[in-house]
Amino acid sequence: MSKPWIRKYAPKTLNGVKGQNKAVSDLKEYIENFRPGKAKALLLYGPPGNGKTVSVYALAREYNYDLIEFNASDIRNKSSIENIIKPALEQKALFSKGKIILMDEIDGLSGHQDRGGISSILKLTENISYPLILTANDIYTQKLRSLRKKCILIEFHALSYISIYNYLKNICQKENIKYDDSVLKQLARQCGGDMRAAVNDLQVLTTDGELRDDSLINLDQRKQKESIFNALKKVFKTTSPETALGAFDDVDEDLEEIFLWIENNIPKEYVKPRDLNEGFENLSKADVFHGRIKRWQYYRYYVYIYNLLTAGIALSKKERYKQFVSYARSMRPLRIWQANRSYQQRKEISAKIAEKTHCSSKEALQSTIPYMKRIFKENKKQAENISKFLELDKKEVEWLRK
């Protein structure tokens, strides 16, 4: 059997990672500025197949680091983390410049079998001796909230179909695959921003050395991120409970994420006050049942939740709205995280001022920081002197300049 193309054509260096220039630049900056005991762990996030894991592999090769990889299935609980990963973090690299610990797909941890997993990972991120890199598809799930605060976040965005098309085209040329340009572009569009899926599909469809139009007809349509949009359409654009029920069955999103999608888009879809009121009424009832599951583990309530989120929301309106609505993910988790991040930076700066000037953190926050922000915006030389005196890091300087 021939070698999988996803491995054969995996980028050997960071320059080979396509469509993620900002993320690659941040990775280089992290590894070049890493200081044992003082650095934070990295948390790479973004949709599946967009280069998170292969970038870490390319990073290790480029900088001559050993790479030790663990998957969520290897680190299910506190015991496995302490027995497997902690020793790997403490043991010295033998033959290379250093080593990188990669913990892949940590958002895959859930349920009773993973008890203590996230909290143990959180402890590992403190006082690390070697670069520790975590990956996740979605960092805005509740279970990763504490990790978001402790790690440096690097986003890997969904790849454009043009980036995927160019990558597939290069493979076709190297493998002497005959193809029609329009068919190759269609394959690139069809994968939903997932490079890994696109390369795997290309290999499967071209075993006879040619990519034909009819090859795509029988290809299974993946339910990628856009499936949440299809599910919302089923709920919002129908008054039939049979059509709405099961809308979220095949959506790869956490229940809390589905709540946020519906909450954010009800006001966009239901413009009549009565329909809007009924929609939020059903959403709030679903949330009550969700709370009871969290408190008392009454898992049988899940059926009520999904009935309310589908048929309940669909039947909240008297008639179907015909206007086009561009559904969007709620920005509330991001804004909360940004506000908390800003507050934390302000708190850390206040503590540094207090230590150097022998005052309280509260006094530094109220009396000193407002003047510092003015100085950092208007007097570059004086700002540099203050930065050195207070030992401010790059992020703290940026915060003061905003």
Image (cartoon, rainbow, N blue to C red):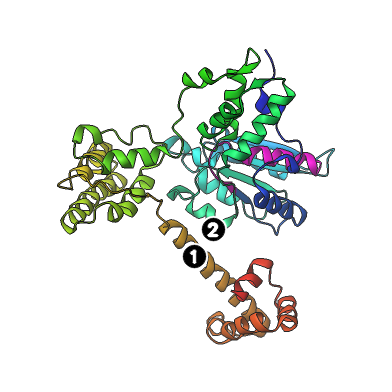
Q: Amino acid at mark 1?
A: Asn
246 relative to 369 in the view: left or right: left
Q: Quadrant of the N terminus?
A: top right
Element assignment for label 2? helix
In the picture, residue 73 is in which quadrant? top right
Label 1 Cα crowd, 10 Å radius (few <14 / some 14-19 / many 20+): few
Q: Amino acid at mark 2?
A: Lys
Residue 340 numbered tag: 1
Residue receiving disc 2: 149
Q: Residue 355, position in %: x, y?
A: 65, 79
Q: Which residue: 61% across, 84% down?
A: 374
In the picture, residue 92 is in which quadrant? top right
Q: Residue 118, position in %: x, y?
A: 51, 46
- Above or below, 122 relative to 70: below
User: Given the current orientation, which residue lies at the most extreme right position?
Assistant: 95
Q: Which region is colored magenta? A: 44-64
Q: Residue 359, position in %: x, y?
A: 60, 85
Q: Which residue: 23% across, 54% down?
A: 280
- Does residue 53 belong to the magenta stretch? yes
Q: Residue 140, position in %: x, y?
A: 47, 50
- Does residue 340 belong to the magenta stretch? no
- For marks 2 and 1, the one nearer the N-term is 2
